[in-house]
Image (cartoon, grey):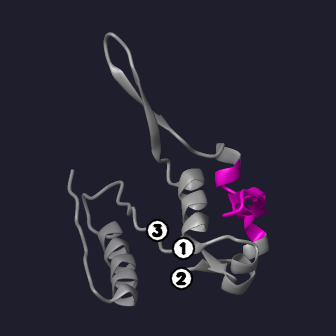
Amino acid sequence: MYQFTLQSGDLNLLYSSAAAFEKRLHNVPGLTDVNSDLQISSPTLSVNIDHDRASALGVSEGQIESALNNAYGQPQISTIYTQVDSYWVMLEVLPQYQRDMNSLGLLYVRSSNGNLVPLNAVASLRLEWDR
């Protein structure tokens, strides 16, 4: 088994070179099962905070970041100790909510006065594709 790693500071050059390199390797006699783990078409979700609206509702940028991290960052919130081992307790949303960007609208942020504010009331979401 062989593995090649391509690196570049120029992302566009890296994408085009990786695709061309993989295509050429497919034509080399004796090589089989040529593949790549490069994911060129990966989506990015941008969360744009409406600072005026968030401030009016008593929600800070830090509170929004914390809510997103708690839901999607899998933070360790506790440890369960047994006689044999210890286990981390991780916080995350259910998998069906991880795959749909519209599920972010179901996420609530606790404001400084204790009220729950839906994320989509203080931020807009935009899906962007790298390529």
Q: Quadrant of residue 92?
A: top right
Q: Earlier in the sequence, mark 2 or mark 3?
A: 3
Q: Label 1: few (<14), some or many (≥20) within 10 Å?
A: few
| Total labels drawn | 3
Q: Is residue 43 magenta?
A: no
Say whether residue 4 is left or right of residue 20. left
**Which of the numbered marks, if any, corresponds to residue 39?**
3
Does any portion of residue 109 appear in the rendered image?
yes
Q: Quadrant of residue 44?
A: bottom right
Q: Residue placed at 35% from the left, 67% from the top?
A: 26
Q: Residues within 10 Å of mark 3 (few under 14, many from 20)?
A: few
Q: Point out which mark residue 41 bears.
A: 1
Which residues fall within the magenta stretch? 97-120
Mark 2: which amino acid?
Arg
Q: Nearer the viewer, residue 17 or 110?
A: 110
In this picture, residue 7 sits left or right of residue 119: left
Which numbered circle lies on residue 131? 2
